[in-house]
Amino acid sequence: MIRKIPALAPLAGLAVFLLGWEIAVHLFAIPEFVLPAPSAMAATIWTEAGSLSLALAVTLAEALGGFALGIAAGLVIAMILVSAPPLEKAMLPLLVAINSVPVVAYTPLALIWLGIGSASKVTMVTLAVGFVVLLNMLHGLKKPEQGAIDLMRSFGAGRATIMWKLRLPAAMPSLVVALRVGIVRAMIVAIVTEMLGAYMGIGWIIFQATQQIGFREVWAAIAVSSLASMALYGALVWIDRRLVWWK
Amino acid sequence: MGTSPATSDDGQELPVIELVNVWKRFGAGSPSEVVAVSGVDLKIRPGEFITLIGPSGCGKSTLFNMIGGLEPCDDDGSILMRGRVQQDGELLGKVAFMPQKDLLFPWRTVVDNAILALEVEGVPVRQARERARAMLPDFGLAGFGDHYPHQLSGGMRQRVALMRTFLFERELILLDEPFGALDALTRAMMQRWLLDVWAEHRRTVLFITHDIDEAIFLGDRVVVMSARPGTIKCSETIDLPRPRDASIVTSPEFMAIKRRLLGAVEEESLKSFEAARADARRVGA
């Protein structure tokens, strides 16, 4: 049965994990502020469903908006740099330097420049995802061997045609890797930025609940965003199969 | 191509391609200068099937890249197409070029790989696909149009690459050891098949090989290249009757030609072998 339906194995794993957690909390009488039982979290999610789903909608919108912008920016910049090798040589050290600091380190600046509304979150996510896409695509777009490029040239293809018909499709596997890393980063960066300054969203709920010693709410928010991340990742796996359809 | 054949002043049809004193030096002027190709003169007439044979590393591929327009030749020589001198890069898009590797794109089906050049030329995809589908049986690929390259055998992949080359309708086809990676049986089959296709889609062919039997079996003329620096050592017209079948390779005429050419080829192979050994010794010292 488990072998037939691939979704069943991870679900079974999750169920065993939650059951063990539930039993452990009751067995060792773990206080709620240390670790609430899954059943208590579920109850909180149920009672707070309205505010949690609103917060989740805000966070998802920021994460997905930044994700889309980051993909677009990373793709365009990678294509420009690969088409102009001297430019790439000049820019790459700078890009690596910016990227070597965790993106969240720029959060205070983003909040000062763009305020505590959604713009700062979308910008931070764009930055985080953009770098992942850019660095993976710089590698992916250069995958075609010189022979394949020469073949295209012998047909009379110019740079744009070579980019479109050879480099981009050849880079699709790299893009898939970037998207998988990027979607996780998008959720993390959106939530962390919200925790540092916002008036809505999952990160804001976590921050507020911590301030008010509402540990159930903290856990409920974490659980909801984890579920959302898993759903996004699942959707991405489905998209990936269409990006690399030939394998 | 529909234009009337261009003729020279003496009324002869102009060669499709003419190499006049073609040189290629890498790192010119430096002490590590390498002369890859030196003073090559070669005329290829319309409809001719020329096979070029020479030891490995003799500059065949460099010569090939120059005829395909991928690399310019040095200034002291020139490449003419139908009597017109071709400047840097001007030959790109004018010669149907097939490199040693099949270089099929894994994300494209057989048909879509075959129409790559047509797409680059701007032929509407639907129309290009129709043309490719009509050619599938000729290339032994009937029923495989929608397969991906990783689903094909080596021989089939090579035929897709050849089909891609033939669909790029240019007077001159350059084939760089297209059957080099195939096993002997498949290779013999592919040679006979290539002659059939050539007879049907009459084109001018320059075919590089290091297999002397292949060179004689396929060619109207066999051109022997010397060891590096590559230059033309000799050339021999093959007047074996066409169509040729497999048994011809054991005929006395074939043997006689092979005996004459073998001497020249082996002498050059030995030279290139000795040169490689000398290089190795110098590096080792």
Image (cartoon, helix red, strand yellow):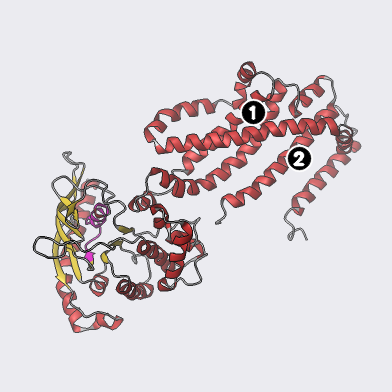
The answer to which of B28 and A66 lies nearer the viewer is: A66
Which residue sits at x=88%, y=41%? A23
Is residue B216 in view? yes
Task: For mark 1, give the secondary structure.
Answer: helix
Name the N-terminal-most of marks 1 and 2.
1
What amino acid is labelled 2 in the image? Leu
Given the image, what chain letter belongs to the residue carrying mark 2? A
Q: Quadrant of residue B40?
A: bottom left
Which residue sits at x=84%, y=20%? A212
**In the image, is residue B6 part of the stretch drawn in magenta?**
no
Residue A77: mark = none
- Magenta stretch, residue numbers: B51-66
Residue A227: mark = 2
Task: For mark 2, give the secondary structure.
Answer: helix
The answer to which of A168 and B55 lies nearer the viewer is: A168
**In the image, is residue B55 part of the stretch drawn in magenta?**
yes
Q: Where is residue B3 in the image (x, y as percent from the top left)?
A: 25, 61
Q: Position of residue B55 (x, y in %)?
A: 22, 61
The answer to which of B119 and B263 lies nearer the viewer is: B119
Q: Quadrant of residue B178?
A: bottom left
A212 to B114, vertically: above or below:
above
Is residue A34 in view? no
In the picture of the structure, the residue carrying the numbered disc 1 is: A122
Q: In which quarter of the image is residue A211?
A: top right
Q: Where is residue A66 in the image (x, y as percent from the top left)?
A: 63, 32
Q: Position of residue A81 (x, y in %)?
A: 43, 35
Residue reaching furthest left?
B10
What amino acid is labelled 1 in the image? Val
Given the image, what chain letter belongs to the residue carrying mark 1? A
Apparent side of residue B83 relative to residue A83 in the rendered image (left or right): left
